[in-house]
Image (tube, helix red, strand yellow):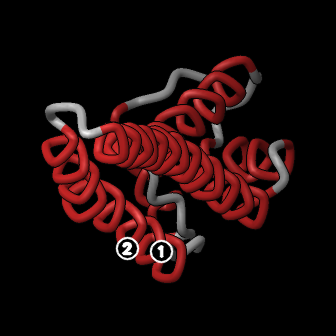
Amino acid sequence: MRIEEKHIDFIENSLKFYGVKEDRLREDLIDHICTYIESRDGEDFDALYQEALQKFGGYASFQNLQLETNLQKFHKESVLLNKLKIGLGFTMLALLVLGMLFKIMHWPYASSMLLGAIITFILGVLPVLFYARYKRLNYKFS
């Protein structure tokens, strides 16, 4: 069967209606469904569409794919935030320890390093910590 633009629009609207919100996932599902329908013999779009849905597990499996996509996106953001927290925390601690060492030894630039550690903590570590906590508490998976 040959797929027309109205069929693609119908498939896209039905996927949106049943909870597939991610654009890339929806495009991939449309592509797979259209490919399946085009590979079959027959002229009844509705019957072939229902057959394709059954083949791919129905709308419930599409919603599960959307949930899995959301979880993967959240995990990727979470890993990035954790790397940023570790990097900023290490920088702050290095400046703090070096500043304290320089202060004990009465070497120059000790105050600058301590001030750099405080600024890194206030402007770097704290905002990232609060943002990560906000994202973790308010992220919706569905």
Q: Considering only vertical position in the picture, is 124 above or below 45?
A: below
Task: Return the residue at label 1.
Answer: 133
- What kind of residue is marked 2? Phe
Furthest-top residue in this view: 39
Can you tell which mark lies on residue 130? 2
| Mark 2, other Cα within 10 Å: few <14 / some 14–19 / many ≥20 | few
Residue closer to the observer: 13 or 68: 68
Residue 72: percent from left, percent from top: 63, 48
Residue under the point 55% across and 56% down: 74
- Residue 33 visible somewhere in the drawing: yes
Q: Considering only vertical position in the picture, is 135 above or below 9?
A: below
Asked if disc 1 and disc 2 are in contact, CB closer than 8 Å, the reply is yes
Residue 48 in which image quadrant: top right
Can you tell which mark lies on residue 76? none
Quarter in which the N terminus is drawn: top right
- Residue 80 visible somewhere in the drawing: no
Residue under the point 66% across and 62% down: 67
* Residue 52 as seen in the image, left or right of residue 102: right
Residue 141: percent from left, percent from top: 59, 71
Residue under the point 62% across and 51% down: 75
Residue under the point 41% across and 77% down: 134
Residue 55: percent from left, percent from top: 86, 43
Residue closer to the observer: 83 or 56: 83
Residue 41 in which image quadrant: top right
Quarter in which the C terminus is drawn: bottom right
